[in-house]
Image (spheres, rainbow, N blue to C red):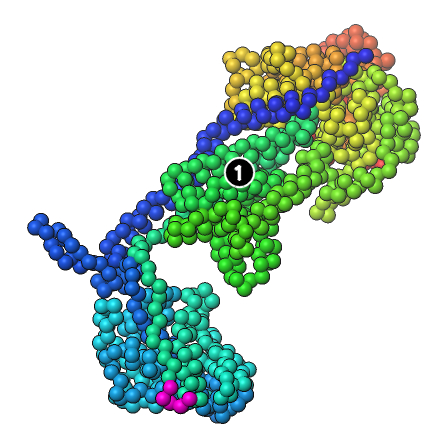
Amino acid sequence: MDSPRGPASFATQANALLRKNLSVQKRNLKTNIGITFFPILICVLLIVLQNIINNELDKPKYKCGCVCLETSLDGRCARKQCGIQYSTLDQVGSCPIPSPPQWPAMIQIPRADFRAVRTFSQPFSDLPDPFCRDSWSCPATVLVTGKDKAVAEAISGGLFPVLSPSLNATDLLDLFTKIVAGSDTQPWYTQLLEPAFFSGRTLYVIQPECLPVMSQTITYNTGGIPFQLNIQCVEGVPLWRESASIINHEFLKGYRQRGGEINEFIAGYDFLGTTQYGLGVNVWYNSTYSDNNAYSFITTLRVPRLVNAVSNAYLKFIKGTGVEMLLEYVKDMPKVGTSFQLDLSSLLSVLFFTWIIELLFPVMLSYLVYEKQQKLRIMMKMHGLKDGPYWLISYSYFLALSIVYMLFFMIFGSLIGLNFFRVNEYSIQVVFFFICINLQIALAFFVASFFLSVKMATVIGYMYVFGSGLLGAFLFRFFVEDQMFPYGWTLVMEIVPAFSLYRGLYELGQYAFSGSSMGATGMTWRSLKDPLNGMHDVMIIMSVEWAVLLILAFYLDQASLLGGGVRKNPFFCFRCLQKKHAPSLHEPSNAQQDSKVILDVEKSDVALERKRVEQLLIDPNANQAIICDNLRKVYHGRDGNPNKLAVRGLSLVLQKGQCFGMLGPNGAGKTSFINMMIGLIKPTSGTAYVHGMDINMDMGNIYTNMGVCPQHNLLWETLTGKEHLFFYGRLKNLKGAELMKAVDHSLKSVNLSHGNVGDKQVKKYSGGMKRRLSVAISLIGDPKVVFMDEPSTGLDPASRNNLWNVVKEAKKNRAIILTTHSMEEAEVLCDRLGIFVDGDFQCLGNPKELKARYGGTYILTVTTPPDQEMEVEQLVHQFSPSANKIYHLSGTQKFELPKQEVKIAHVFDVVEKAKRRLTIHAWGLVDTTLEDVFIKVARGAQVFNEFV
Ligand SMILES: Nc1ncnc2c1ncn2[C@@H]1O[C@H](COP(=O)(O)OP(=O)(O)OP(=O)(O)O)[C@@H](O)[C@H]1O
């Protein structure tokens, strides 16, 4: 018995696919190099920008100011002294400050035009009259409350000590120790500089009552820096409120709101249960007055004076006015000289690097969808490629590409000195990036299941890359930085792969930034224990997601067209479990039992074929290559169209070594039949057996012994003809010399061996050459069953004859089913024919039988002048009374003459004699051709179907 070839092993298939992929990628070298070098380009861009910034920051205007104390003879400065006293505001930040200045402790005072006043909504409030705003002379108010009103009022009355005329106004530190002073400037985040003294704005002395002499301009000197200060008195008014909640409410209402009134207070004091035996006080201070958002500098630096003021007032309350609690000054810690730095790679890098890493995503996505869109994946599957090698090789290829890409990025980034890479521990980066790229590959496989068009997938892929990067930088980042935002929600957002990537890069960037600017170490494995470091959680989330997405992607792949070659329902797995009983080769199917007995005599051969199928299903026979058992295909009607019955219960038996031709008009259902047989679409009911294997259950195994030449060429444009044949040959388990021989033979047999055509890329092939290559692919590896859908379409007569010889040679030891519109091809190649009309066989048999059965007539054609048509017709009826006129136009008439009525010699005789009295321009008598049979059967079937 002729046993089918064994399937190629996993390793052989993986090897075949790997070689094919390498060839494809070799052709895409430029693109691949472009992709790999993209991160380098971005690094170079960053470094160029960094240099520009460094150059700018290196200019004297950003360095600590100096004066030259001694000039040398050549005019250079021999001795210079630097310090904040010689610096402008831009320069001070970089000066060393070994002995930081002492600043009077200030409080924050609302701007004159924002101070709380009586409003329309509260006309009887005890707040100052609003007219004071016109003259910028509104008092500044403090709201107080407590259990004991008398105590609270007594203490708060001493909050702002009265300026004594004996105080020396030039020693400001001393002056501001004794009184409460404030500023409406925005405090800085250090107290190395107090903007109240630098900004040129008025400095306020808060007094219970203001006298005109209290406002003046004085000169002040701190740390050797002289300042001109404009000092102004402002009245400080404590106002009693019944409860803390009223104070809260007034503070809230007075806060800057769009369209609302601004009513700002200095502060609020809740004296709680304060008595002469103990002070307990809550202080309200405004930390957001400087800006309307919560992300400005922390502004608690002006709180100490508020606390001191109330403590001092309380001391006076219990001990009398002679006792004071003084807050001398506030002073920052000393600092070394620094230079201004802006580390772009650490700051900008997070967004840029997110984009760089994600950029591989659309590349992989479009690659996967391309194979699906071009039906190349299913083509490979039809030639035996199993899912395992496909996934392994595709995944490994993407992984290798991503690793090279990331290595280039890290190595180059480190070499050119990007702190992002250099400061953080490399092992953390390697682990993090490895997880990232794996997650990205799994995501690409997962997303690819939802697309059928490369264009769409590419557009969506790039939108995801740029959109998610921007969302990460301008939305997600704020949630990460907001300490108040629930951490659980941040973790939920990190389920989006782009956000988890962003978070990881953000953490690396933060550590790199603090590492480079503050001399700290970058991220180490120990840093992962820091609860504020999100890297630990990000790595866990990404790893879990990677595994989950891979499983989901594989599941969807199986459920989609890619999987079994048949588009399955996404819930196919559950359906499999529910399926209790599948039809087998030995049991007739239900559909078959329902089949009607075809009484039409014309279709007796079709009925006979059905009987043979029934018989073979009960009593199988190893000689049969293909058995189709009542195959039906119904396409669901879309957009309001009715369902389409494309194949109506087709039954057929095909023996080994036979070539079966399927003839039929356009839309008859031939391609639908072939597509069911090759696993492209699933039968609605019925099944077929290829070498005993059920197409509904065992397509994977059938593919190892099947060759397919689809109606449209499914080829890689960048591969050569030879590479195609090598690839499919290896999939069919051909190796070494056998493979070389088979490829050479294939190329020769389809006439693609001359002039090195086989080594040219398919995109340079003509339509006919592609067709011949498709036929060669379908035959390589000696498949036992071959399906060819219109194999000679688009071939010139010489190539067609050549192709016929190939098929004739090939059919010797295999079964071939081909569809064709060429009667000549059918007659030359096919041992059996079936004329297929409207989803059904109308007749079956070999070409001679069909011609004999449907063509028992001769066709007589006579051309005369039109006025002699009648006489010709009478003449024909004289020697063939049953003659049937099938055509007439302008004197040309065609008659069908039953063969039993006429003798050819007699017809010649009659016509020659008639020439004497009639003007016969031309005439001819031919036997019926297959074409006549086809037209007759097809027309008859259509008329019948219309009638039914
Ligand atoms: N996916 C589909 N959805 C709905 N109807 C379809 C689908 N594919 C094919 N048909 C319809 O089924 C019928 C059979 O189509 P099929 O392509 O099988 O015919 P064919 O004999 O191969 O035609 P041709 O010789 O032109 O290739 C046609 O009426 C066609 O419009």
* Residue drawn at (90%, 28%) of the image: 587
Q: In the displayed structure, would residue 84 be above or below residue 124?
A: above
Q: Which residues are magenta?
A: 319-323
Residue 868, given in percent of the width and then of the height, sits at 72, 21
| Residue most extreme to the left | 73
Nearer to us in this view, 755 or 580: 580
**Left or right of 935 on screen, residue 153:** left
* Residue drawn at (49%, 46%) of the image: 524
Question: Residue 855 in magenta?
Answer: no
Residue 52, given in percent of the width and then of the height, sits at 31, 48
Q: How many other residues sit within 10 Å of disc 1, few (<14), some (14-19) or many (≥20)?
A: some
The residue under label 1 is 363
**Left or right of 735 on screen, residue 27:** left
Quadrant location, ligand no. 1:
top right
**Left or right of 357 on screen, residue 565:** right
Q: In the displayed structure, would residue 700 be above or below residue 279?
A: above
Residue 588, given in percent of the width and then of the height, sits at 90, 29
Nearer to us in this view, 584 or 804: 584
